Image (cartoon, rainbow, N blue to C red):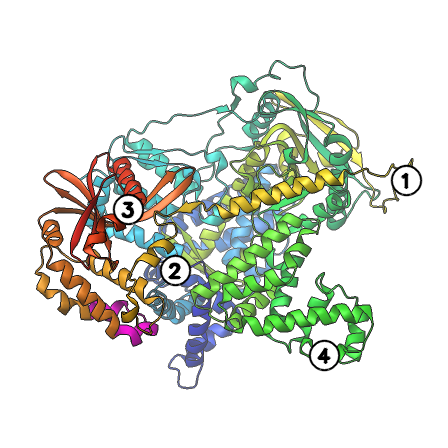
Amino acid sequence: EDDGTRFERLFDELWGVWLDQELSRQSSRQEEWKGVLRKIGLGEIKTLTSSLCSETVDLQRLSAIAHGEKIPQPIFAWLKSLEEKASLLLERHPEERSNEKLVRASHAILQKFLRSGDPGGHELSESGQDSLSGNISKKLKGWPEEDVAEAQEIVRAARALCQVDDSLSRGLCDLLIPFAENFRDAFTRDGMISFDGLLARARTLVRDCPTVREALKRRHQAILIDEFQDTDPIQYEILIYLAEEIGRQAKDWRKVKLTPGKIFVVGDPKQSIYAFRRADIEAYLEVVEKIIKAQNGIECRLSANFRSHGKILDVVNGVFDRLIQPRDGLQPDYVAIEPAPRKSTDDGQSPLPFRKVAIRKVRGEDEKPDTETARRLEAESLARWLEEDVLGKAEIVDENGTKTVVQPKHVAILLRKLTDVHYYLEPLRRRGLHYVVEGERHFYAVQEIIDAVNLLRAIDNPHDKLALVGVLRSPLGGLTDAEIYELHRQRLLDYQAAERFKGNQKTTFSNVKELYELLSRLHREIRTLPVGEAIARIFDSAPVRLLAATTFHGEQAVANLEKLRQQAELMGREGLSTLKEVVTRFGSSVLEIKEEAESALAEENLDAIRILSIHKSKGLEFPVVVLAGCHTVLKQAGDREPAVLQDWSTGLAGLRAESHWSLAGLYIAEKARLREEEEQKRVLYVAMTRAREHLMISCAPAERSRAGSYLSLLEETLNEEIAARNESHLITAGDGTIELQVVRESLSPPGRARTTAQEEPLQMDWQSYARLWQQRARECESALRTPLFLTPTLLKLREAELTEALPEREKLPVSSELPLLIGELAHRFLENWDFGDDPAEFRARLEPFLDRWIEPKQQANREQLQRELEEILASFFSSGAYRELSSSRILGREVPLLIPWDGRIMEGVIDLLYEREGQLFLADYKTDRVEKKDLARHAENYRHQTTIYSEAARRSLKREVAGFKLVFLRLGQAFEVSH
């Protein structure tokens, strides 16, 4: 499966070649390209084409819709409903004011589309577009909020219709779909498949292949799907087909007859928040209502909440009972939640004042701060609040029901997006409050990665002076700009010229000379090493991990360096075989600040404040939750990016390219906008239900809240102008109460803290400290000497000494690996040998076997290998041991085992399991050179192996082992070892 890297690389390769041909003078489609390029640029076309290459896009259907002569029925119904709404609005508002003029102009555009019945055969006049200038006023007399909202929807749709260009959509489909089809074929031939491709092909397989579908239906007797509300609609189709009644083969998922009782789904539509991952609330509701419940499915509503106490849930219900209202295909009914019995009170303790819901409104010296100032004010206030009022002071009830004070690990700061997280980090860092950012995708922008990539670039290319300067300025070099300039002035910015430092007594130059010698040595050493080994050598030789560990986020920095090393190793295995290519890729990622998550810290008990997005927090709980930035509005940056838009419920697909739309694309985008509007309410619900003990809603608004912010949603629901409030008071939310806290914050530079008294010097018992670390060192060495995994032959070194030990007079000048290789080849040959075949055929099969399995570096020894194997196999195939196996029932060959053994893990491979006269036997091939008279003594070397293998078979197969036989192939003797 491809993570996107190979897709991008292959796409760039094929796109450049194809585009050169398409835009050349020999191209047969010059006029079509001219028509398209007059409207959109090549960059946008490339982005759109990349979107078309996804296997989830049905290219034939997209082309058919683009070339359709009539408006598709769902779009016609949508336009008709808007036209009817506009007519009713004009009846209620017959005046000629600004709002009425906008609605009347929009009504005319809608009627024109509906009369033509043609999605692309007309152009709107400039006067029609000019008539839509201006905005619907919310303050116009006689216009209630409901009418304003309807008018805004109508005008927005009319303006978008002015940008519909179906002729452009048809031209793009005709030009780009052939490339997308060829790319998909090339990608598959390259042996790769994306996750989207896996989904699409799995859906096609179960839909269109009756035998596979029937077999899978019979294999899976029950289907349980968790988090159903966030499932991809393509996965819905797959699951519905698998839940179909045996013997039926519906081609359309809507017509599937479900097997009663087979499918069980668990989902909370209030928590459907992953539209950006193709979760579709309309698809969820359609499957649940029109497929499952329509076929007598039973709905069980779960309302008990085991996370939050009653005060939090009273507020949650009070807010969302009004905020989440049912809308067809967009939002189901709100189902209230109740605290579990143990959470309904203060757990028998005296009430704790911190167990509550609060809104913290931050005000600055300026009553109307700009966006950046508001964020900084809020961040400063939160850090102050955590340090002075919460950490180590506020009391909560822990998971065991006992009182405790809040520690950093109890606190989570949730943000809608991590784009502005840096505003919140600086005040925390300044106050020494440890934190971990989870899910931030700026891996290539963190300093330790930039420094490490500079180090790799410099070692790989001694002439990359920019990278060398980066190394010298990093903690590894520790030089100032002035000192680097001095090196440049003396022509010493070249680590291969370390000898020029001779005679220079400056301490700075002495340190640089040592660093230069290290870089020069590494440059020589890594040239022949594999990529992963080369990076490991660099990180082991240069103290980059140690330096990273001394930074504020030491653990995270070290984890990031390890992730970089693992990425390099993976790239090397995937085909970027040279260090230069890997370093070039890293350098590009740093320059472009490619999105990549930092390495996740595994320590769950890390005592640090968690900072994460609301989406990342889903499914988690935290004692104290701060919902920060509630005054901000999300920027929909990707709304104008060229893309293929698809709607699962209607089966429609369309295009968006700059300011141009296909009609289907416009319809799908409008549906997505409405879904996003409702989804943001559910995101707020998820955020407010993460808290176990205390929920703080933080904001720093200007005089008025901004539409689309969480603050505006809360104001609308609570009927409270929070942004305009200047004093603290209580707000009622259903049966719950929210404490509004209005606080002031300043961005003035903090003063230096004064020391009240000179601290006593810290007394350390260094002797006990040294003894403690000596003991730890001894324990560490002991643990390192004790392998976690064991093999019966103690890493097989002992067996290697016993196997293939040639008498001195027969020794040949061959590789020391040859004896082990002979044993390995004999085992591999017998693994695939059918004991029912004629033994005389083995020589004919040995030739092609050796062709396949002998590596190029061993070809010089092929004659010796073949001679040895023929001698071994000829002896075995003519023996009584072979005849016994030929008349037995073979149960398994080369059977791997993995069992616990004396506190460690034993692993190995059983060469042969067979059954004779109803009894179970184990056999192990040996190619040892041993005399017949020494068999009994020699077999004792393998008694430990016999015991382990017999015990593994007994545990796994629940059968007693009748015997374990060592088959000495050279003698053709099977020696049974008691166990």
Q: Considering the image in quadrants, where does the C terminus appear? A: top left
Secondary element at tag 3: helix
Q: Which amino acid does label 3 sit on?
A: Glu
* Marks 1 and 4 in Cβ contact (< 8 Å): no
x then y, percent, for residue 110: 47, 53
Residue 940 visible (yes or no): yes
Q: Which of marks 3 and 2 is nearer the N terminus?
A: 2
Residue at label 2?
Answer: 118
* Marks 4 and 2 in Cβ contact (< 8 Å): no
x then y, percent, for residue 469: 71, 71
Give the residues drawn in magenta, as a range.
Answer: 848-862
State the residue lying farthest toward the bottom. Answer: 25
Residue at label 1?
Answer: 754
Q: What residue type is labelled 2?
A: Asp
Residue at label 4?
Answer: 499
Q: Earlier in the sequence, mark 4 or mark 2?
A: 2
Q: Earlier in the sequence, mark 3 or mark 4?
A: 4
Judging depth in this view, the residue of 275 and 559 nearest the camera is 559
Mark 3 and mark 4: Cα distance apart in space: 62 Å
The part of the image, by quadrant, that contains residue 458 is bottom right
* Marks 3 and 4 in Cβ contact (< 8 Å): no
Q: Residue at x 22, y 46 (%)?
A: 213
